[in-house]
């Protein structure tokens, strides 16, 4: 079949070739991209052949490049992504040879986008990095802005928040210098999301205020309510509930004035969460239901799932969780499955259904294991072997719990059989009947105690699982790997090698220790030193660290619960020293006095009062409760191992930092 000449397409091509400056060329190329959406495969093939003829090449060497550009776009629009990728890469190679930087940048940028959609995000990231060098030489600042934004987005997709923030900030600076207000607004909102996930709430609020002012100035009525939405989310995380209520009400009002219901489900859900915090329960239930109804009306499956998960947990009604699960299964919304299992476990535990709660905890643990494998927990061969040991140990612990539950069920069935036999033996002697009846009561009492013990063990396992999730947080892995990546990018191989070595040692140590309930004091202190050294490298030597140990102590004979001290050291660094403008100090003093092991963790950071304003909940969907987990864990360990551990947190004078005093029997 012979394609007909597409006059409109040929006019677009000629307009691009006739552009007299980079700004004009950028505009014409953007117009050609939009036009290609309506070009057929037959027409694209026709021009690929036509523009590669010698008559066209002799007139302008860019004709073959344009032919590949058209073919790549049309193949992509027709879902032929593999073929589209080949055409984009061919365009890039030929454009580089001819020094056509704008077409080369467009080719490699689109190739990265296609590669990402095909699932190779790391390969896409490498292409985008190459593209930054090309886009700096196209002559149009918007080209550099576009590709810097693509790099930031790719880092965000990979969970590498620190790098995504750096490049979103660069994109914002480019748009600010070129007075591209709409670009500024978009980049600010992307930064709001990343800073919110990172817990940098003050920066989010500052961006919200600027974004609202610019949106009002340029009359961007669509972006203004979204800024209020992020403002409300941040204020909710900071426990500023009345301010959050005012912000989300403004977001709802603005979108209702615009007659735009597409985002109302998200807004209603935030409003419901705020009302719940203000103990306005009837209004909260009303807006949870409105969030679900709005999501259904707009056919936004993610909005429906998010609202059902929140409402189910708040109301205690498992039917909403079941509805969310059905949508997750049908729409394959796997990113919500962990929260689903968490909510199922919490609801069943609240009702005393420990067996069901344990089942969902187990599902969540399996999900985390698979996720961690996919995210590259096997950074080194050593960490891979250690992780395998953890998986095996966790499986053994689960099998032991299952065995005990099975034995308890078997006991219950035996008791029921005994009771039936006793009923049939009513004609037996009164003494025998009394004896058997008493024996039954004793067995039931023993069974009840065993079930209580199993429930207690489930509590311990839950705390250990939560603590393990905290230790193995994928965001910590990404931040660490990103720090290594930045050292390499900035040509600092010595620091990269040093960081990677310590990272490998820390991963191996955490994973090896995680299978033990009690470890030696030497092992705990070694793990702490590795952790502090890595954090100090990551934060550019922001603080000095000192470890003082009483020489009389036998570190190999004293055992303490694994990873007991790390949450307090982490708090000192992240909430105290990290927020301190000047260099700080972190000191750990270990000694034995009056038959007790005493450990002091002292920092001269900003203090708890100042840190409270910057309270860091790492993830909105999964808030960090490190101190609560550690406190509960100590209570449980005191009951199990009788270590009589006590923790006291002391605010130092004049807001000069914090001291954590840990005491326990040797």
Image (cartoon, rainbow, N blue to C red):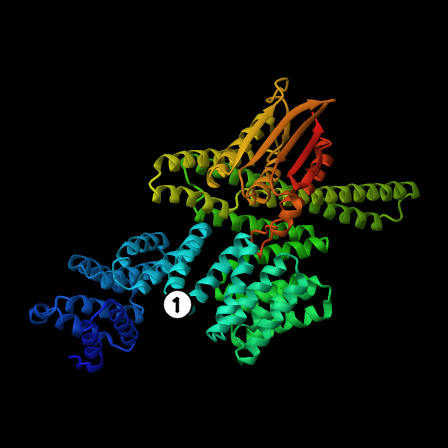
Whether residue 502 sits left or right of residue 18 in the image: it is: right
Q: Which quadrant of the rendered structure holds the N terminus?
A: bottom left
Q: Is residue 311 visible?
A: no
Judge whether 520 appears above or below 81 on screen: above
Q: Nearer the viewer, residue 426 or 325?
A: 325
Q: Nearer the viewer, residue 488 or 1?
A: 488
Q: Residue 629: which quarter of the image?
A: top right
Q: Secondary structure at mark 1?
A: loop
Q: Percent position (x, y) of residue 77?
A: 31, 71
Q: Residue 636: which quarter of the image?
A: top right
Q: Nearer the viewer, residue 580 or 299?
A: 580
Q: Which quadrant of the rendered structure holds the C terminus?
A: top right
Q: Percent position (x, y) of residue 519?
A: 60, 29
Q: Nearer the viewer, residue 340 or 240?
A: 240
Q: Percent position (x, y) of residue 502?
A: 45, 34
Q: How many marks?
A: 1
Q: Is residue 637 visible?
A: yes
Q: Which residue is mark 1?
A: 180
Q: Percent position (x, y) of residue 63?
A: 15, 69
Whether residue 645 sits left or right of residue 426 in the image: it is: left
- Extreme right residue here? 430
Residue at (23% x, 59% y) in the render = 89
The 10 Å Cα crowd at callout 1, few under 14, some 14 to 19, many 20 or more, is few
Judge whether 641 appears above or below 613 on screen: above
């Amino acid at each position: 079949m012979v394609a007909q000449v597409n006059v409109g397409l040929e006019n677009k091509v000629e307009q691009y070739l006739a552009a007299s400056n980079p700004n004009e060329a950028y505009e014409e190329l953007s117009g050609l991209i939009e036009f290609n959406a309506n070009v057929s495969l037959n027409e694209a093939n026709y021009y690929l052949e036509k523009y590669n003829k010698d008559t066209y090449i002799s007139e302008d060497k860019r004709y073959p490049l344009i032919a590949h550009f058209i073919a790549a776009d049309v193949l992509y629009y027709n879902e032929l992504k593999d073929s589209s990728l080949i055409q984009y890469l061919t365009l890039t190679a030929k454009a580089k040879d001819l020094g056509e930087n704008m077409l080369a940048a467009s080719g490699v940028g689109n190739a990265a986008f296609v590669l990402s959609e095909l699932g190779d995000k790391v390969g896409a990231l490498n292409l985008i990095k190459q593209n930054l060098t090309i886009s700096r030489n196209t002559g149009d600042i918007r080209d550099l802005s576009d590709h810097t934004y693509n790099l930031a987005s790719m880092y965000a997709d990979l969970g590498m928040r620190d790098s995504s923030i750096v490049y979103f900030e660069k994109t914002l600076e480019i748009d600010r210098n070129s007075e591209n207000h709409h670009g500024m607004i978009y980049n600010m909102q992307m930064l709001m999301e990343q800073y919110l996930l990172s817990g940098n709430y003050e920066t989010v609020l500052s961006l919200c205020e600027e974004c609202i002012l610019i949106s009002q100035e340029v009359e961007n009525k669509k972006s203004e309510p979204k800024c209020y939405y992020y403002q409300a989310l941040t204020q909710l995380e900071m426990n500023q509930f009345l301010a959050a209520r005012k912000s989300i009400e403004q977001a709802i009002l603005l979108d209702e004035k615009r007659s735009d219901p597409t985002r109302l489900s998200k807004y209603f859900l935030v409003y419901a969460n705020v009302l719940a915090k203000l103990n306005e329960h009837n209004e909260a239930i009303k807006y949870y239901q409105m969030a679900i109804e709005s999501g259904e009306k707009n056919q936004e499956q993610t909005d429906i799932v998010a609202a059902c998960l929140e409402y189910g947990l708040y109301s205690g009604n498992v039917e909403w969780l079941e509805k969310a699960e059905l949508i997750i299964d049908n729409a394959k919304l796997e990113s919500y499955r962990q929260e689903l299992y968490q909510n199922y476990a919490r609801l069943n535990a609240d009702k005393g259904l420990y067996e069901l709660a344990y089942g969902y905890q187990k599902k969540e643990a399996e999900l985390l294991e698979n996720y961690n494998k996919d995210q590259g927990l096997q950074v080194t061969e050593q960490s891979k072997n250690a992780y395998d040991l953890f998986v095996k140990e966790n499986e053994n612990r689960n099998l032991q719990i299952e065995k005990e539950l099975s034995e308890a069920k078997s006991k219950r069935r035996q008791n029921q059989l005994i009771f039936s036999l006793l009923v049939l033996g009513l004609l037996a002697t009164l003494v025998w009947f009394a004896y058997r009846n008493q024996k039954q009561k004793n067995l039931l009492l023993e069974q009840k105690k065993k079930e209580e013990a199993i429930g207690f063990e489930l509590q311990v396992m839950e705390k250990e699982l939560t603590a393990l999730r905290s230790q193995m947080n994928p965001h910590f892995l990404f931040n660490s790997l990103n720090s290594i990546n930045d050292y390499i990018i900035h040509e600092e191989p010595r620091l990269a090698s040093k960081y990677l070595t310590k990272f490998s040692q820390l991963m191996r140590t955490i994973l090896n220790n995680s299978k033990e309930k009690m470890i030696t004091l030497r092992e705990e202190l070694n793990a702490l030193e590795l952790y502090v050294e890595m954090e100090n490298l990551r934060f550019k030597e922001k603080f000095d660290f000192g470890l003082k140990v009483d020489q009389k102590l036998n570190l190999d004979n004293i055992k303490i619960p694994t990873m007991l001290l790390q949450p307090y050291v982490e708090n000192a660094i992240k909430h105290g020293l990290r927020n301190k403008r000047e260099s700080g100090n972190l000191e750990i003093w270990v000694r034995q006095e009056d038959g007790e092991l005493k450990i002091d963790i002292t920092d001269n950071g900003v203090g708890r009062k100042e840190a409270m304003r910057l309270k860091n909940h790492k993830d909105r969907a999964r808030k960090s409760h490190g101190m609560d987990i550690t406190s509960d864990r100590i209570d449980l360990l005191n009951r199990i191992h009788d270590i009589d551990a006590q923790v006291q947190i002391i605010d130092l004078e004049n807001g000069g930092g914090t001291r954590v005093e840990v005491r326990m029997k040797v």
